[in-house]
Image: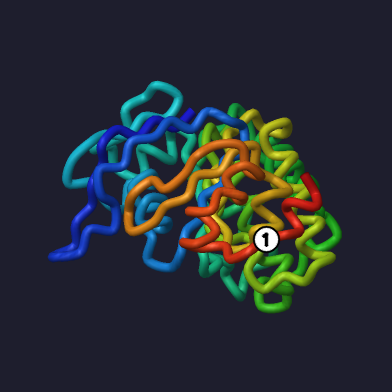
Amino acid sequence: MIEINDISVQFGGVKPIDGLTVKLTKPIVGLIGPNGAGKTTLLNVLSGFVEPKQGWVKVNDQLITGVPAHKRADFGLRRTFQTDQIAEDLTLLENVQAISDHVKFESREAETKAIMSAIDFVGLSHRIHRRGSDLSTEERHLAEIAKALIGNPKLVMLDEPGAGMSGAESEHLEKVIRGIPGYCKAQVFLIDHDVDLISACCNETMVLDFGKLLALGPTLEVLKKPEVQQAYLGNFDELEAAA
């Protein structure tokens, strides 16, 4: 569970998040909004890369405001980035192993099992010896998710994991994202511009607009709200047909 209380972030005269208060309890939560709405800033606040000017954040009732980023990782916060962090000269296996170096395991056997399990979960067991430079866009995004699943995560934050994927690739990504809570019992916080991905994966969705909460609720209900469509989505008649 993510609990955000009256947080504001200010960069000079710009306020990308302004007095945001929200409680997110569902297994998979979506976050959408127009460019500049404060989405990535909010992820950076949760990750510990940006400290709010005011307010506080809790994850699973644990106060994380003021806690350094590496301590949040120890606690179980994981994230991916819009630009993947895959090392070109390392194999996929070595890329995932590099994350395990920062996680405590009971034994080397337990570490190896966790690494291979995460790679298998995202469907990349057949690519473990492929170098980062030879991985496709889809494989790089999936490898990033595998890295985020190492070490008993409590919250997995995904920043546009579907960027650059084809329709068929997005279908596989949907299955992976939907499976994360069952795989490791972590809550998923998903940011993406692909509304189809959001609607397929998320139990609830929040919408930010100029740093303020515009809407929060069951995903299809949120996507149909006139104020959401006006701010971000346009006219989604197919959602009406699907409901």
Q: How many marks?
A: 1
State the residue in front, 104 or 231.
231
Q: For the point 49% across and 40% down, which residue is it? A: 216
Q: What colouring method underlies this structural image?
A: rainbow
Does 213 appear above or below 191?
above
Outermost residue to the top: 61
Side of 67 relative to 83 (left or right): left
State the residue in front, 13 or 214.
214
Q: Is residue 99 visible?
A: no
Q: Position of residue 93 (x, y in %)?
A: 70, 57
Q: Is residue 223 visible?
A: yes
Q: Position of residue 98 (x, y in %)?
A: 56, 54
Q: For the point 20% across and 64% down, which residue is it? A: 14
- Give amino acid for label 1: Phe
Q: For the point 66% across and 32% down, which residue is it? A: 184
State the residue in front, 98 or 57.
57
Q: For the point 65% across and 52% down, which residue is it? A: 198
Q: Residues within 10 Å of mark 1 (few under 14, many from 20)?
A: few
Outermost residue to the bottom: 133
Side of 179 relative to 102 (left or right): right
Does 9 appear above or below 68?
below
Which secondary structure lies at badge 1? loop
Outermost residue to the left: 12
Side of 63 relative to 153 (left or right): left
Q: Position of residue 56 (x, y in %)?
A: 26, 34
- Residue where numbered disc 1 is placed: 236
